[in-house]
């Protein structure tokens, strides 16, 4: 049986999220994640979900580290882990800076008013600090990006080893995850891409004498069943926007969609979104998503399993009623 997780939009009404989380729990999904960015606070919402569920893992996918200090994340994580009875999965990411993504409104600078600097060093320091705080230590830490002088909880954490998953796409961040993370959450990438970056994971793990198989690998995959035209359109739209970012454009070029992705990027940057969507070929969309009849999805998911993905993190673009139906269908199929 496949290990399934569900990612929900963190801006949805709480009652909707409760319905989705309960449905996932009843359908044997392993975990339920919330997106965060310009959404509601994920940690407060996860605490509320913890009172309405009993067994399913509850996580962030992902909390952006520049939105809070390491101390604040440690405090929030400890509180949520207590409220959920040790079910928190802490997903962390760096997001994107304005310089690397010109015109991107959701850059760290635009959203949080802080500079996007030293992402690799920041993530390393962040995770090191959070881990030490959760262990109950008085933390004196001098890092390249963050420093702390003697901070210590005045309460014991219910769990000192909360699993930390890193959102990692580039080779350096993937290597860092091999060193220090419990898991990786890839996002909207192809199996071929994952194959290409696995050596970085292995090399990172070797630095600390670790087996790379100890790192749990998950991948967020956009999904839309054939019976939801609205969801299918949303997947197409999301992937058209992906083509306009340098990282994903490189991936699509490696997959053989160089001309197509460049044209789509030009249209997106020119503001002609509908034409960009219309210009996005089905083969490109299918390279990084699950669309069509769900009964055929297991075969595609096998491609992800073959390259080391053990946690299949579905991101349905469906509405509530459709999502409840899809949760039941996928649990039966997988």
Image: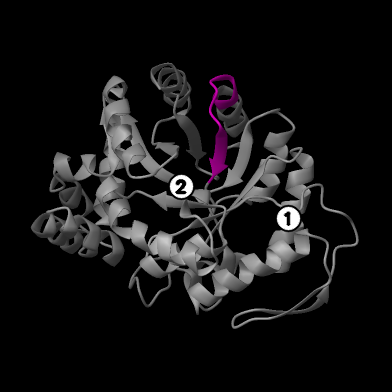
Up the image or down, 130 lies above or below 90; here it is: below
Front residue of 167 and 68: 167
Is residue 205 highlighted in magenta?
A: no
Q: Which quadrant of the figure has residue 68?
A: bottom right
**Disc 2 versus disc 1: nearer the observer:** 2
Front residue of 252 and 138: 138
State yes or no: discs 2 and 1 in contact (Cβ < 8 Å).
no
Q: Say if residue 94 shows up in the picture.
A: no
Residue at the image point whose x is 28% and y is 44% from the top: 288
Mark 2 crowdedness (10 Å alpha carbons): few <14, some 14-19, many ≥20? many
Residue 24 image position (x, y, % from top left): 55, 26
Residue at the image point whose x is 83% and y is 61% from the top: 136
Residue 307 image position (x, y, % from top left): 33, 44
Residue farthest toward the left in the current orientation of the protein: 259
Q: Which residues are magenta?
A: 24-34
Q: Is the image coloured rainbow, by chain, by secondary structure, or in one colour?
A: one colour
Residue at the image point whose x is 53% and y is 28% from the top: 29
Residue placed under numbered mark 2 in the picture: 217
């Amino acid at each position: 049986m496949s290990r399934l997780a569900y990612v929900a939009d963190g801006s949805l009404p709480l009652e909707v999220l409760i319905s989705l989380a309960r449905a996932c729990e009843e359908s044997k999904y392993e975990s339920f994640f919330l997106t965060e960015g310009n959404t509601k606070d994920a940690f407060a919402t996860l605490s509320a979900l913890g009172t309405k569920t009993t067994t399913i893992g509850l996580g962030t996918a992902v909390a952006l580290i520049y939105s809070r200090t390491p101390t604040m994340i440690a405090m929030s994580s400890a509180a949520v882990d207590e409220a959920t009875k040790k079910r928190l999965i802490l997903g962390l990411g760096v997001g994107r800076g304005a310089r690397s993504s010109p015109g991107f409104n959701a850059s760290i600078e635009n959203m949080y008013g802080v500079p996007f600097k030293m992402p690799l060093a920041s993530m390393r320091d962040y995770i090191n600090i959070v881990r030490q705080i959760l262990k109950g230590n008085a933390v004196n830490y001098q890092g390249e990006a963050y420093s702390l002088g003697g901070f210590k909880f005045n309460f014991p954490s219910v769990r000192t080893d909360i699993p930390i998953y890193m959102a990692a796409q580039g080779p350096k961040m993937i290597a860092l995850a091999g060193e220090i993370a419990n898991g990786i959450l890839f996002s909207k990438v192809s199996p071929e891409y994952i194959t290409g970056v696995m050596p970085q994971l292995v090399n990172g793990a070797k630095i600390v004498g670790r087996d790379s198989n100890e790192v749990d690998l998950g991948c967020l995959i956009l999904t839309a069943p054939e019976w939801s035209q609205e969801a299918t359109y949303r997947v197409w739209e999301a992937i058209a926007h992906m083509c306009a970012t340098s990282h994903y454009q490189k991936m699509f070029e490696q997959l053989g969609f160089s001309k197509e992705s460049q044209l789509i990027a030009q249209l997106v940057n020119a503001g002609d979104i509908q034409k960009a969507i219309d210009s996005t070929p089905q083969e490109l969309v299918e390279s990084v998503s699950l669309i069509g009849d769900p009964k055929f999805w297991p075969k595609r998911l096998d491609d992800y399993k073959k390259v080391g993905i053990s946690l299949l993190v579905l991101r349905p673009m469906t509405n509530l009623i459709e999502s409840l139906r899809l949760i039941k269908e996928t649990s039966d199929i997988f």
